[in-house]
Image (cartoon, helix red, strand yellow):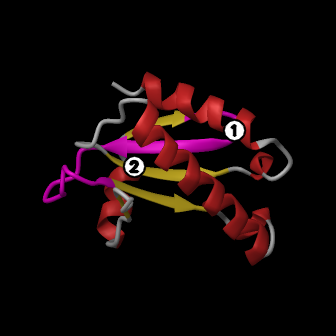
Amino acid sequence: MKSKILALSKNEEFKDLINKNKLSNKYVTIFFGVLENKNNKKLNISFVTKKKIGNAVKRNKIKRRLKNIMNEAIRKISIKFNYSYLIIAKSTMLNNEYTNIKDIIFQSFRKIK
């Protein structure tokens, strides 16, 4: 199945999202809002992991986990495709189980209206 995830590409898009709505939990911070000129058939989302978290292997592991969680979320819960999302990972993601992280992120996405 082809992925329905499309990454944000322009610096202005990141800056606009940071100034819009914000939702936090112990694993991630989610910035979301409506961006102009975006495709509403695909999920516009980007994942950010800071260098403070660890080396490239650890950061890529976190990004892979987040991509898998979002692919599951598209299938299982209703995510608003008219919003664009920026997910910034926290260092607590490294030492916890995938299922715990997935449940908490699902709860956060259910709160977004």
Say which element carries label 1: helix
Q: Position of residue 6 (x, y in %)?
A: 34, 63
Outermost residue to the front: 1
Question: Left or right: 78 with respect to 102?
Answer: left
Question: Looking at the image, which residue is at 77% across and 52% down?
Answer: 91
- What residue type is disc 2 on? Tyr
**Residue at label 1?**
101
Say which element carries label 2: strand
Question: Left or right: 7 with respect to 72?
Answer: left
Question: Looking at the image, which residue is at 55% across and 25% down?
Answer: 107
Magenta region = 24-43
Quarter-of-image position of residue 82: top left
At label 2, counting other C-alpha atoms closer than 10 Å, the crowd grade (few under 14, some 14-19, many 20 or more) is many
Q: Taken as a whole, is the magenta stretch helix, strand or loop?
A: loop
- What residue type is disc 1 on? Ile
Question: Left or right: 95 with respect to 68?
Answer: right
Q: Position of residue 59 (x, y in %)?
A: 71, 67
Mark sitting on residue 72 = none
Which is nearer the N-term, disc 1 or disc 2? 2
Whether residue 104 appears in magenta in the rendering, the answer is no
